[in-house]
Amino acid sequence: MTKLITVLNGPNLNLLGQREPEKYGSKTLVDVEVEVTTLASELGLKVLFQQSNFEGGLVEMIHAARETSAGIIINPAAYSHTSVAVLDALNTYDGAVVEVHISNIHKREEFRHHSFVSARADGVIAGCGTQGYSLALRHIATLV
């Protein structure tokens, strides 16, 4: 049976490739999904790629992953720094969790240096661009 990894993306990531390309690069979220899906197949995994601009949407996606997924890769975007609700939802999840940030949040504004999600994550990848998703998938494959 192929293990499913849920890849969750937070607010504004639907604009990846358009929004601040000097900071986030020119690849779109669809480009990232194709790369991750291809790598997942090579690793014997399947991925469910999702995005929401709404905190509650991410919480519901995490709840759904409790029943379906061996691991979660999450780029909570701005909710990293503000959402106890996303952290609480992740705390209800028993599988592996890897947090991804395209930019290095520790080189940005001070309020971005803290991530609530990191308290639950089994690994954190930041500042590797969109390649961070593939790195996260490779890591989560070792955990599941």
Image (cartoon, helix red, strand yellow):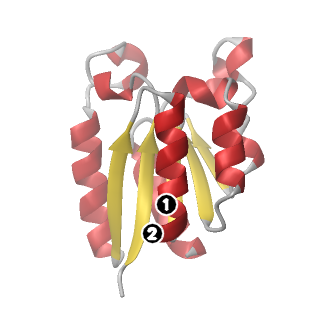
8 up-or-down from 116: above or below: below
Badge 1: few (under 14), some or many (20 or more) residues near its Cα, within 10 Å? many
Residue 74 location (% of width, % of height):
52, 46
| Type of the residue with mark 2 | Thr
Q: Nearer the viewer, residue 1 or 68?
A: 68
| Type of the residue with mark 1 | Ala
Q: Which of 67 and 133 is in front in this view?
A: 67
What residue lies at 69% left-to-right and 42% top-to-bottom? 87
Judged left or right of residue 83, residue 73 is: left
SS at badge 2 = helix
Badge 2: few (under 14), some or many (20 or more) residues near its Cα, within 10 Å? some
128 up-or-down from 122: above or below: above
127 up-or-down from 68: above or below: above
Residue 41 location (% of width, % of height):
27, 71
Q: Can residue 108 be seen in this view?
A: yes
SS at badge 1 = helix
Judged left or right of residue 94, residue 30 is: left
Q: Which residue lies furthest to the bottom in this view?
A: 1
What residue lies at 30% left-to-right and 22% top-to-bottom? 15
Residue 20 location (% of width, % of height):
37, 13
Q: In which quarter of the image is the N terminus?
A: bottom left
Q: Mark 1 points at which residue?
A: 65
98 up-or-down from 83: above or below: below
What residue lies at 73% left-to-right and 35% top-to-bottom? 116
Task: For marks 1 and 2, give the CA distance.
Answer: 5 Å
> Which disc number belongs to residue 81?
none
Q: Name the residue under label 2.
A: 68
Residue 139 location (% of width, % of height):
54, 64
Q: Is residue 69 visible?
A: no
- The reply to whether discs 1 and 2 touch (Cβ–Cβ < 8 Å) is yes
- The image quarter in which residue 88 lies: top right
